[in-house]
Amino acid sequence: MSFGHPLLLLALLAIPLAVGVHVLAERRRMPYAVRYTNLDVLAGVAGGSQWRRFVAPVVFLLALASLCIAVARPSVHRMLPSERATVILVVDASGSMQARDVKPTRLDAAQAAVRTFLNRVPKRVRVGLVVFAGEPQVAAPPTTDRALLVESVNQIGMFPGFGGTAIGDALAEAVRLGQQAIGTGGPTRNLASAVAAAPVPGKDLVSILFLSDGKQTRGMLEPLQGASRAKAAGFRVYTVALGTPNGTLTRGFNGFSRTIPVPPDPTTLRRIADDTGGEFFAAQTSKALDSAYAKLGSSLGRTPGKTEVTFAFLLGAIGLLLAAGVLSAVFSPRLP
């Protein structure tokens, strides 16, 4: 916590001063003899728990302390939504995403997790969607229209494209889309010109959330070349390796079927995250995947900042003052 006017915290010294004056007055109070005819009633009034007489004054002092802190304009440090933040979601839609080692399928689990992310990320943050298999395609440009994004997420798997997994090209496309979003990417270009363009640091304005369930099998760029593009642009890449090491996919043709192993490639995805300053997640269940996206939805698109909490301390002081008044009325002894 920090304060806009820290010197005003010296007002808190009034609290121990008030306590000291009260204690001194109690010690110097002269004893008085009281003549009262009904000793039983007097004993009932004077008796009871001694701590009750201190409750109201303590609550009043807490109210006074809250007021002293409020005038010093306190602020707390927290992660605040960024007005210019953009998150590019990149989702693998290759054939291996139909594997059922992650229930109900890898693709279904990924779609559910992305919807969870969209519910968690701040509404002011623009989100774009890139879907890829053998080549990347922009499914939704960066936008704050969550309904459009959810519709695009629901259609993942319906985008035509060559078979395979082009991790490097998908990263390059996400970088291009992110640069366009912050005004450093220029007009829409093909992949070759995007790779050749001189990068401009994005200063963490863009984050890329990349999900894949397999190794690279197609594409112009190697995965780490795509990561270099993101690093040069100043974009962190958060990667998710979806699937289990023993994941398989069954393919049938002319009455014959064969089982194809489709393990993820966590080593490459971890390297991409490390090289760009992002974070790596391994998701072998739909629950783990949803948890990863929920966590990222609560952190991406936010920057460190300060929020003033003066009003909270003022409300606290008012509440404590009211409580002190009520407690004083309840616990004060009354003579008949």
Image (cartoon, rainbow, N blue to C red):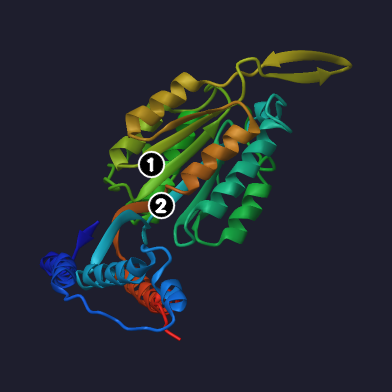
Q: Which residue is drawn at 49% across and 53% down?
A: 121
Label placed on residue 267 = none
In the figure, residue 59 lies in which quadrant? bottom left
Res 132 visible: no
Front one among 166 and 109: 109
Between the C-alphas of marks 1 and 2, the distance is 24 Å
Label placed on residue 301 = 2
Q: Where residue 42 sits: x, y (%)? A: 41, 77
Asked whether the residues under the numbered discs 1 and 2 touch, taking CB atoms below 8 Å apart as contact, a structural biologist would say no
Q: Residue at x 64, y 42 (%)?
A: 111
Q: What crowding class fits label 2: few (fewer than 14 Cα within 10 Å), some (14-19), or many (20 or more)?
A: many
- The residue under label 1 is which amino acid type? Ala
Label placed on residue 194 = 1
Residue 172 against residue 85 in the figure, above or below: above
Q: Where residue 67 sits: x, y (%)? A: 26, 73
Residue 264 against residue 28 in the figure, above or below: above
Q: Nearer the viewer, mark 1 or mark 2?
A: 2
92 left or right of 186 in image: right
Q: What crowding class fits label 1: few (fewer than 14 Cα within 10 Å), some (14-19), or many (20 or more)?
A: some
